[in-house]
Image (cartoon, rainbow, N blue to C red):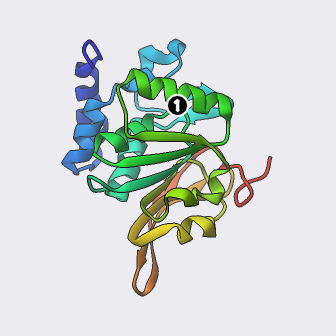
Amino acid sequence: MNQDRADERAMMVQTQIRSRGIKDTRVLRALETVPRHFFLPDEYSAIAYRDHPVPIGHEQTISQPYIVALMTELLAPDPGDIVLEIGTGRGYQAAVLAAMGTRVISLERIPALADTARSCLQKAGVENVSVFVADGTLGWVEMAPYNGIIITAGTPAVPSALIEQLAPGGRLVAPVGTADLQELVRLTKTSDGIRKEQFGGVRFVPLIGRNGWRL
């Protein structure tokens, strides 16, 4: 973690994250800790801490830092929680969750990206993330139920398989809507059923899979 541009991360957290209402100190600490530039293609390393998404190849992107922080704060994982991530990308969101003390199971449909994510996570010294190549819309029953589930691609609806794999009291955060524009939602599994909350418009690449968008 030495020589990892910590001053840029501190500035990112102050000007892009804290100033826009993110208050969870564990989230802020994780964003200050994880070297985001490790998770970008080399040609984009110089802009790793700017306030916008960045292409990572295969028609995928890494979300802007604020969105990563917002989704993480909404998920509100506790240390020791098991979290399922749908859409690994190059592993940055998983690394942020891991920095908060969670065990992350991350699913990526593109094998080349999954390989890259494993390399990025290793480079960053992240150990408590497992990356699997799979259709994320089906979830990963082997480790269910999950205390939290985070979907990092836009889905037309939350796949029922993922709701089934959510533990009682667990939370699921996802962008839900059309292929071009979604609403960020949080679902909480309560004793009375599923409670839904909405947190504004977002735009993600589409979630591809059996229970998402089709290629």
Q: Name the residue under label 1.
A: 90
- Residue that protrudes farthest toward the bottom in the picture: 192
Residue 94: x and y, percent? 43, 41
Residue 22: x and y, percent? 27, 49
Nearer-the-camera pick, 182 or 75: 75
Q: Residues within 10 Å of mark 1 (few under 14, many from 20)?
A: many
Within the image, what quadrant is residue 121 found in? top left
Residue 11: x and y, percent? 24, 27
Instruction: Judge left or right: residue 149 versus residue 8.
Output: right
Nearer-the-camera pick, 127 or 213: 127
Within the image, what quadrant is residue 18 found in? top left
- Residue that protrudes farthest toward the right in the picture: 215
Within the image, what quadrant is residue 47 found in? top left
Instruction: Judge left or right: residue 91 versus residue 133.
Output: left
Amino acid of disc 1:
Arg
Residue 57: x and y, percent? 64, 26
- At 22% from the left and 51% from the top, the residue drawn is 23
Residue 19 showing in the rendered view: no
Nearer-the-camera pick, 148 or 18: 148
Nearer-the-camera pick, 165 or 86: 165
Q: Is mark 1 on a helix, strand or loop?
A: loop
Residue 119 showing in the rendered view: yes
